[in-house]
Image (spheres, rainbow, N blue to C red):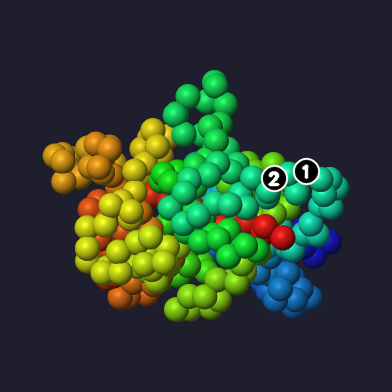
């Protein structure tokens, strides 16, 4: 009841004191004082919170329709931002949640038949293993992946893809200003996620070793990885031991698919001439190694000429990826 009285009395005051037009009938000062006394009397029985609430409601009534509409828009926008943040957090939680591996039965005979084909492979040989899009014509399916054999000790076969299979600049959206390591870079996740799932059959997956990868930061366990500086300067693997040498074995030639996905083939980055080609006359590109560069923002790379850039580059460059892996022969 008192709240109703308060609304009425405030409304009268608004009509008297806030009207832009002259009232038709002048209200005597004594009447105004009486109204004020009634307000004061009503206030005595109403808490401050309720008074504030009524005041806010009156202020809301005074606002123009445009102001009220703007308030609604702002409230909806705030709710939308809160919802987007909530969804983002949920997605991050799902992405980082460990999942139990799906057990798929693989016939041991199929495994033995597969690894036996690689038993006699020697350093410098090329083998096929897995399949991935390379000719940039998806209608004819993925092409077999060719791999250069780096070593074969009888129990394990260490291999590096012959060609650069993918590019990294816009494919992964790496932040130029973010600290970078092999452990945290996005294409490590891609190699062990989408690439691993798409490029290999279940039999092939069963013989890919989970390898402990040593790096200048935290060590990782990976099925697919990038070679290190030490790897591409290892004479036993068939490379030149000098990091600055223009080594034919280190030159990376991108596939058509990689070239169309930011691998940065020389002729597509305004570099032409025989110096930017391999001995087969194919244009080369820069490609990444997993070794940390000279800053927390860079990884080392091999350049167009087969030399190692030990200072490294930030990960938003037009460089490519040559995956490496180890096949368990036993």
Helix, strand or loop under label 1: helix
Disc 1 marks which residue? 110
The answer to whether residue 206 is above or below residue 29 is above
Viewer-nearest residue: 284 or 75: 284
The residue positioned 46% from the left and 34% from the top of the image is: 134
Q: Residues within 10 Å of mark 2 (few under 14, many from 20)?
A: some
Disc 2 marks which residue? 114
Residue 310 figure quarter: bottom left
Q: Is residue 253 visible?
A: yes
Furthest-front residue in view? 120
Residue 295 figure quarter: bottom left
Q: Which mark is residue 19?
A: none
Q: Is residue 291 left or right of residue 11?
A: left
The residue positioned 48% from the left and 45% from the top of the image is: 126
Residue 219 figure quarter: bottom right
Q: Position of residue 226 (x, y in %)?
A: 47, 60
Q: Position of residue 30 (x, y in %)?
A: 59, 66
Q: Is residue 49 left or right of residue 74?
A: right
Quadrant that contains the C terminus? bottom right
Q: Position of residue 326 (x, y in %)?
A: 59, 59
Quadrant that contains the N terminus? bottom right
């Amino acid at each position: 009841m008192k709240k109703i009285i308060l609304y009425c009395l405030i409304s009268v005051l608004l009509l008297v004191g806030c009207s832009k037009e002259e009232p038709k009938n002048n209200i005597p000062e004594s009447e105004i004082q009486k109204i004020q006394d009634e307000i004061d009397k009503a206030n005595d029985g109403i808490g401050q919170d309720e008074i504030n609430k009524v005041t806010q409601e009156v202020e809301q009534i005074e606002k123009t329709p445009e102001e009220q509409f703007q308030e609604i828009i702002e409230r909806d926008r705030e709710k939308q931002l809160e919802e987007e943040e909530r969804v983002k957090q949920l997605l991050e939680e799902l992405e980082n949640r460990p999942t139990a591996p799906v057990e798929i039965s693989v016939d041991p005979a199929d495994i033995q038949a597969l690894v036996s084909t690689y038993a006699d492979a020697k350093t410098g040989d090329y083998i096929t293993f897995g399949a991935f899009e390379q000719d940039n014509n998806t209608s004819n399916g993925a092409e077999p992946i060719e791999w250069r054999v780096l070593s074969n000790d009888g129990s394990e076969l260490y291999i590096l893809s012959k060609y650069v299979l993918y590019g990294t600049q816009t494919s992964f959206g790496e932040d130029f200003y973010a600290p970078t390591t092999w452990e945290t870079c996005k294409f490590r996740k891609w190699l062990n996620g989408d690439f691993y799932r798409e490029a290999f059959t279940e039999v092939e997956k069963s013989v890919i070793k989970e390898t402990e990868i040593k790096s200048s930061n935290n060590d990782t366990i990976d099925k697919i990885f990038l070679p290190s500086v030490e790897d591409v300067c290892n004479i036993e693997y068939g490379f030149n031991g000098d990091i600055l040498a223009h080594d034919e074995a280190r030159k990376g030639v991108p596939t058509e698919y990689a070239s169309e996905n930011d691998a940065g083939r020389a002729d597509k980055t305004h570099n032409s001439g025989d110096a930017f080609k391999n001995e087969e006359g194919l244009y080369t590109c820069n490609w990444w190694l997993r070794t940390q560069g000279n800053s927390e923002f860079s990884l080392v790379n091999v350049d167009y000429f087969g030399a190692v850039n030990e200072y490294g580059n930030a990960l938003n460059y037009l460089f490519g990826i040559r995956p490496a892996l180890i096949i368990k022969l036993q």
